[in-house]
Image (cartoon, rainbow, N blue to C red):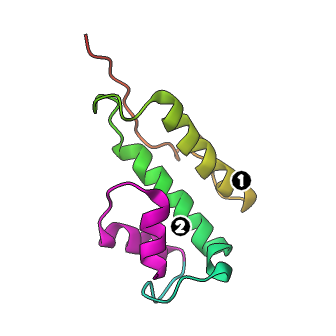
Amino acid sequence: MTILEALKYSVNYPLSDGNAESRLIARGFSDTEEDFTEEIANSRAYRLAYADMLRYVLTMVNLNQGGSVTQASVKALEGTANAIYEEYGEPLIGEEGNSPKVVIMETW
């Protein structure tokens, strides 16, 4: 399995290769087709790319999609990403200027 494939599998949300690859490259991976290893899985760069992907997914979720995404799952995604960001001293989701735009709409 490649680093790119591992990131897409771990996020478990329909994402394009380009979307995932751009986050890996932004975090310092020059070869996203490299074999995924335990060392890479535990690296700062990969964990932050994973948090970046969760942040991206938060911008894409729609709570009107047949109840498949709940407010609780949105909070869980945010919490997971923020735990990683906090571990590496990165700005947290919800801090000024670092919030994804998630709109929660109720249907009648």
Q: Residue furthest top?
A: 108
Q: Residue at x 43, y 44 (%)?
A: 58
Q: Is residue 46 visible?
A: yes
Q: Amino acid at mark 1?
A: Glu
Residue 93, by quadrant, is top right
| Residue 78 sits in quarter | top right
Question: Alpha-carbon neighbours of circle 1 within 10 Å: few (<14), some, or many (≥20)?
Answer: few
Query: x, y percentage for residue 31?
Result: 46, 89
Return the x and y of residue 16 as percentages of the image width and height. Answer: 29, 66
Tell me the residue at 39%/74% (across/down).
21
- Left or right of 17? Residue 97 is right
Q: Main secondary structure of the magenta part?
A: helix
**Quarter in which the C terminus is drawn:** top left
Looking at the image, tell me whether mark 2 or mark 1 is earlier in sequence order.
2
Q: Is residue 49 magenta?
A: no
Question: Residue under circle 2?
Answer: 49
In percent of the image, x 29 and y 28: which residue is there?
64
Residue under pointer 1: 86
Describe the element under mark 1 as helix, strand or loop.
helix
Q: Which residues are magenta?
A: 1-27
